[in-house]
Amino acid sequence: MSCQEDAVWYLSCGLVLGGVMLFLRQTTVCTPYGRYVGPSEGILVPARVAWFLQELPSLLVPVVLVLTAHTPSSPGRKLLLWTFCLHYFHRTFVFSLLTKGRPSPLKIVVSATVFCSINGFIQGHYLLHCFQYTEALQTDICLVIGLILFFLGMAINVHSDHILRCLRKPGEFTYKIPTGGLFYYVSGANFFGEIMEWLGYAVATRSFPAFSFAFFTMCSIGPRAYHHHRFYKEKFSDYPQSRKALIPFIF
């Protein structure tokens, strides 16, 4: 398959536009998931099933693209693509099986599945058929810094999710104040880690598709950190006043 540059460009622009629209919507209303799901959200999907179904396409689509490619791809391209897939392998087969979250509305699961399918194609197709990877890039400072940011962000994200899972004992449904790790500084430590991941991925690839995805991620889960922060401050009178919403010491 040849590089479908126009399709990748327009789809990436769609991610940017979708991110802006989602951000503006969430400035007033939080996306109905988890603690924000109301009684009138219609059909609900169990959390583990929902996370598995909606995250799987971001892993499956790039893998299919690799397996159906007519010409072998360079190791550098595959390195960056497998970096992308690593996050979604964890989300699909580890996070989804361990989560103790609340059920998600079916419409949210469907929209997330569609998004992950499209984004999986954008990132996979671009890296396999459009990205120009040369030997000089193997020691490029942007590649090195980007990969460091990606794996550091993933470590923060995974560790923060672990802290959140361990807050409740089996059978408990009450909310507690998360402590430890980056939660000492921000309410949305898991969101901060994921944003760092995709910013690192974008720096490593230096591509518009990757930056558009990183931008969409910031617009999508950045406001969630703010809503979580406000929820904690309203619910707990002893919530740490020095803790920020998303960015340590700043916001």
Image: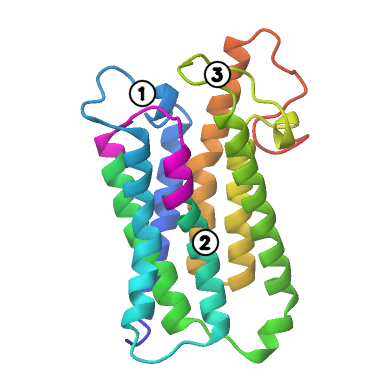
In magenta stretch: residue 101: yes
Q: Mark yes or no: residue 217 visible.
A: yes
Q: Amino acid at mark 2?
A: Leu
Around disc 1, counting alpha carbons within 10 Å, would you say few (fewer than 14), some (14 to 19), or many (20 or more)?
some
Q: Amino acid at mark 3?
A: Phe
As drawn, which residue projects farthest toward the top? 237
Where residue 79 appears, x then y in whole percent? 56, 75
Marks 2 and 1, the one that precedes in the sequence? 1
Residue at the disc numbered 3: 231
Where residue 7 appears, x then y in whole percent? 33, 73
Magenta segment range?
A: 93-108
Is 248 rendered above or below residue 128?
above
State the separation of the CA atoms marked 1 and 3. 14 Å
Q: Residues at badges 1 and 3 in contact (C-beta under 8 Å)?
A: no
As drawn, which residue projects farthest toward the left? 43
Where residue 80 appears, x then y in whole percent? 55, 73
Residue at the disc numbered 1: 37
Helix, strand or loop status at disc 1: loop
Marks 2 and 3, the one that precedes in the sequence? 2
* Left or right, 202 with reference to 10: right
Say how the picture is coloured: rainbow
Residue at position x 46%, y 56% in the image = 88
Query: What label does residue 86 carry, if any?
Result: 2
Q: Residues at badges 2 and 1 in contact (C-beta under 8 Å)?
A: no
Residue at position x 25%, y 38% in the image = 107
State the separation of the CA atoms marked 2 and 1. 29 Å
The one nearer the camera, 44 or 247, is 44
